[in-house]
Image (spheres, helix red, strand yellow):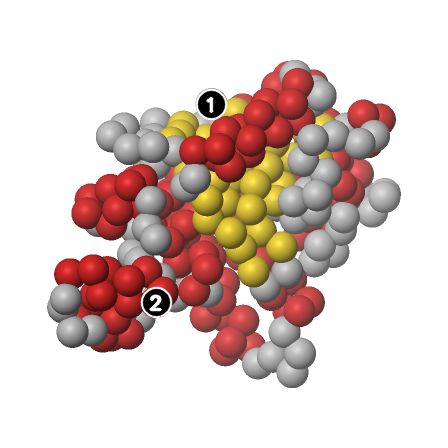
Amino acid sequence: MCSPTLISHFEAGRRLPNPDDAQRIDRALGTDGFFARWLEDLDSDFRDDFAAVAELEQQATLIQQFALTLVPGVLQTPEYARAVFGAYRPNHTAKELDEAVVIRTRRGRLLDNPSRPVVWTLLDEAVLRRRVGGPRVMAEQLQKIGDLAESGRLRLHVVPYGVGAHALLESLLILMSFEDSAPVAYAEAFKTGNLMDDPALVSAAQSAYALALSDALSQQDSLALVRAAAEEHAHGRH
């Protein structure tokens, strides 16, 4: 059964139904498979469980993201993204990597607007230390994040190693809020993701984010840590 929140996102065009939702809508409206066939005709650049998230990002007024091991996709440089894709695609071709990088870079244009959406980025310190793509790629990636934070486009916080266990130690998390509809949350694991609109689950995700944020360094100290990590990578220190 589709929740009222989910239906409101469908009606406003902020989210596409998944195949199961489309079949349920067809049964409820007696549309003889129209929505299921329409959905099959659409072509998305993203994995099925992430396509709706990419659409919602474009409509959100506030995005709060947490990353445990990798730089969030919307912040990745092309070289960093290429290293990530190459690591888990066996027997990949240069063309396949090029296409994946273009798609990810296009998603990053979300930040081209200087004021919307408001973006909070919370990173575990492990994101800064894992040398993805080599020293130069990592240094440039962290410099980009630092520049975005320093310009005011990004609110940046880092949860340092010294904190130990924290509320988001198990998962990547994205929270999204909108002007005229209920917020949603997205959690991701290997090759799968869960977009949540149930108010109780979203509230639990928001609480976990707030708890982890309370353990993080200040924006000023977080920026200093990111800059220092970028320098360490640039000079080959680890």
Between the C-alphas of marks 1 and 2, the distance is: 40 Å
Q: Which mark is residue 19?
A: 2
Residue drawn 25% across the image and 71% down it: 36
The image shows residue 16, relative to residue 203, as above or below, that is below
Q: Nearer the viewer, residue 173 or 7?
A: 7
Residue drawn 52% across the image and 25% down it: 155
Q: Position of residue 49 (x, y in %)?
A: 46, 60
Q: Is residue 175 visible?
A: no
Task: Locate residue 86: give its quadrant.
Answer: bottom right
Residue drawn 31% across the image and 40% down it: 5
Q: Nearer the viewer, mark 1 or mark 2?
A: 2
The image shows residue 143, relative to residue 206, as above or below, that is below
Callout 2 amino acid = Pro
Q: Position of residue 116 (x, y in %)?
A: 33, 31
- The answer to whether 136 appears left or right of 208 in the picture is right
Q: Position of residue 82 (x, y in %)?
A: 59, 63
Q: Is residue 57 visible?
A: yes
Callout 1 amino acid = Gly
Q: Nearer the viewer, residue 74 or 225?
A: 74
The image shows residue 103, relative to residue 56, as above or below, that is below
Residue drawn 28% across the image and 74% down it: 40
Circle 2 packing at 10 Å, graded few (<14), some (14-19), many (20+), is some
Task: Locate residue 38: give its quadrant.
Answer: bottom left
Circle 1 packing at 10 Å, graded few (<14), some (14-19), many (20+), is few
Q: Secondary structure at mark 1?
A: loop
Task: Give the residue at mark 1.
Answer: 152
Q: Position of residue 4 (x, y in %)?
A: 29, 41
- The answer to whether 168 appears left or right of 155 in the picture is right
